Image (cartoon, helix red, strand yellow):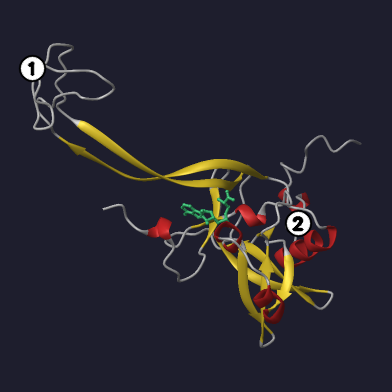
């Protein structure tokens, strides 16, 4: 007899959750990203301030007001514009990011940070521009220093995960497959569908972490 969705009625027959370590190994070996994640272009809102300005001469876009400021001494006839409040918004463009389209549970494997594995010696000989350099992830494994160079646009999602140093939802861990280290993101708390996947890039003075004021 067909199952007809009876798994929902009988929880004991639900597909068992894959061990996160095995899940990571499986995706590393298959060289695939996990389903349920997508690339989205994002901007990060950094704040807003409002200032009240009365009767500013509106020398904006050629519009003139009947009032004058120190830089506008001509008697002005034209569109009267009294600005009482000016709101200024600041956005720090994050560029692309990775969003969950299905929920993930705490502990789940989420993504591999794919790229070229370099030993410290190799990476020292490469030169990177400032954009490429943000795709380098240095790490230590078995007492040696390595780097994953993810500067190549290869359509993988791990390289697009953005920084969040206060409330990240993932953490990077090293997983060995066939004797080689791989960097993988694991959920450190439940992640809701629609939430951006993030991790802490580490203790650097990243410009986007600075408050605008
Ligand atoms: C590894 S890339 C991440 C993917 C990148 N957003 C993209 O579109 O290619 C790192 C770069 O993303 C941006 N970025 C990462 N986290 C950010 C954040 N929290 N706020 C603003 N920009 C961020 C910075 O430009 C940084 O140099």
Mark 2 C-beta to ligand 1 under 8 Å = no
> Circle 1: is it few (<14), some (14-19), or many (20+) Cα within 10 Å?
few
- Answer with the quarter of the image where residue 170 lies: bottom right
Q: Nearer the viewer, mark 1 or mark 2?
A: 1
Q: Farthest front residue?
A: 74
Which residue extends farthest top?
A: 78
Residue at figure coordinates x 72%, y 48% from the top left:
155
| Observer-nearest of 123 and 199 | 123
Q: Is residue 156 left or right of residue 105?
A: right
Vertical relation: 87 (above or below) 156 = above
Report which quarter residue 16 is drawn in: bottom right
- Image position of 106 (left or right of 126): left
**In the image shown, does 176 or 40 lie closer to the viewer?**
40
Label 2 neighbour load within 10 Å: few <14, some 14-19, many 20+? few
At 31% from the left edge and 52% from the top edge, which residue is drawn? 212
Residue underneath mark 1: 75
Q: Earlier in the sequence, mark 1 or mark 2?
A: 2
What residue lies at 58% left-to-right and 63% top-to-bottom?
133
Q: Say the numbered circle drawn on residue 16.
A: 2
Q: In this view of the protein, which residue sits in the foreground, 151 or 17?
A: 151
List x then y, in percent, for residue 196.
54, 48
- Give the percent coordinates (x, y) of residue 24: 74, 63
């Amino acid at each position: 007899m067909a199952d007809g969705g009876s798994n929902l009625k009988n929880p004991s027959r639900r597909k068992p959750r894959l061990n996160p370590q095995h899940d990571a190994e499986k995706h590393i070996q298959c060289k695939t990203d996990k389903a349920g994640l997508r690339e989205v272009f994002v901007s990060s809102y950094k704040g807003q301030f409002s200032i009240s300005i009365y009767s500013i001469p509106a020398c904006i876009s050629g519009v003139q007001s009947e009032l004058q400021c120190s830089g506008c001494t001509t008697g002005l006839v034209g569109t009267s514009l009294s600005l009482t409040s000016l709101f200024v918004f600041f956005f720090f463009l994050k560029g692309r990011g990775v969003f969950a389209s299905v929920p993930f549970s705490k502990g789940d494997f989420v993504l591999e940070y794919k790229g070229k594995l370099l030993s410290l010696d190799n990476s020292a000989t490469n030169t990177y521009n400032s954009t490429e350099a943000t795709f380098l992830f240095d790490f230590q494994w078995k007492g040696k220093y390595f780097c994953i160079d993810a500067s190549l646009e290869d359509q993988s999602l791990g390289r697009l995960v953005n920084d969040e140093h206060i409330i990240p939802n993932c953490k990077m861990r090293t997983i060995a497959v066939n004797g080689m280290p791989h960097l993988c993101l694991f959920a450190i708390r439940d992640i809701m569908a629609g939430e951006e996947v993030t991790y802490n890039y580490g203790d650097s003075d990243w410009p986007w972490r600075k408050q605008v004021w």
